[in-house]
Amino acid sequence: MLQLQQKKPAKPNREVAQALEALTISDNASARHLATKALVNWATPESADALLKLLDDKSPIVRGPAMAALGKLKHKEAIPLIAARLGSLQDRVQARGVLLAIGSDAEGEVRKQLESAEWQTRYEACKILKTIGTKESAPALEKLLNDPQPLVKQTA
């Protein structure tokens, strides 16, 4: 699996992806992590269902690569699930990177995170929208100009 993680195929092989997907249901978190990390390079669109399930894995070392693989596939169904991970301290950095990589397709779901009760989530959403946002996000950001958290207010 380590060798598969290092290879970056021009076109991922479905058979390799299926073999890795089978390992993602292991009871061993390390095996799930290694297989999911390899799927970042080997996942095909057919891998999306297996990767979506991994977003609920107990281990952040599994959830992170699953987000990365889904982001690389630009899987639309994953965008709201990844945006929701901005609320998780363990997943926030990975989710931010993936949402930035997805780009403007993620704008609407990131904008929804501006309404979070947690200021850190609102702050992350503001930072992401600075890069991927359009005029459509301006009204939601303007609402945060009165946010009780100074960092959120300043970033908005």
Image: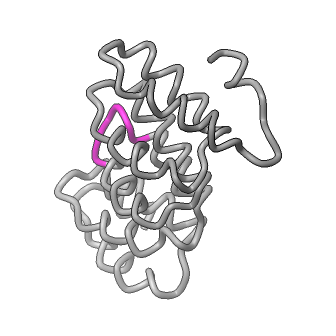
Which quadrant of the figure contains the N terminus? top right
- Say if the magenta span includes residue 123: no
> Furthest residue to the left?
117
Q: Is residue 151 at all visible to an observer of this figure?
A: no
Q: Residue at x 42, y 61 (%)?
A: 79
Q: Residue at x 26, y 55 (%)?
A: 149
Q: Residue at x 34, y 79 (%)?
A: 140
Which quadrant of the figure contains the C terminus? bottom left
Q: Is residue 34 left or right of residue 62?
A: right
Q: Residue 92: x percent and y percent?
A: 40, 41
Q: Residue 141: x percent and y percent?
A: 38, 75
Q: Is residue 4 left or right of residue 61?
A: right
Q: Is residue 10 left or right of residue 56?
A: right
In this view of the protein, which residue sits in the foreground, 92 or 35? Answer: 35
Q: Image quarter for residue 22?
A: top left
- Say if the magenta span includes residue 91: yes
Q: Of helix, strand and loop, which mostly describes the magenta segment?
A: loop
Q: Image quarter for residue 37?
A: top right
Q: Is residue 36 at all visible to an observer of this figure?
A: yes
Q: Is residue 120 left or right of residue 156?
A: left
Q: Residue 89: x percent and y percent?
A: 32, 35
- In this view, 57 is above or below 71: above
The span shown in magenta is 87-92
Q: Residue at x 40, y 51 (%)?
A: 49
Q: Total label count?
A: 0
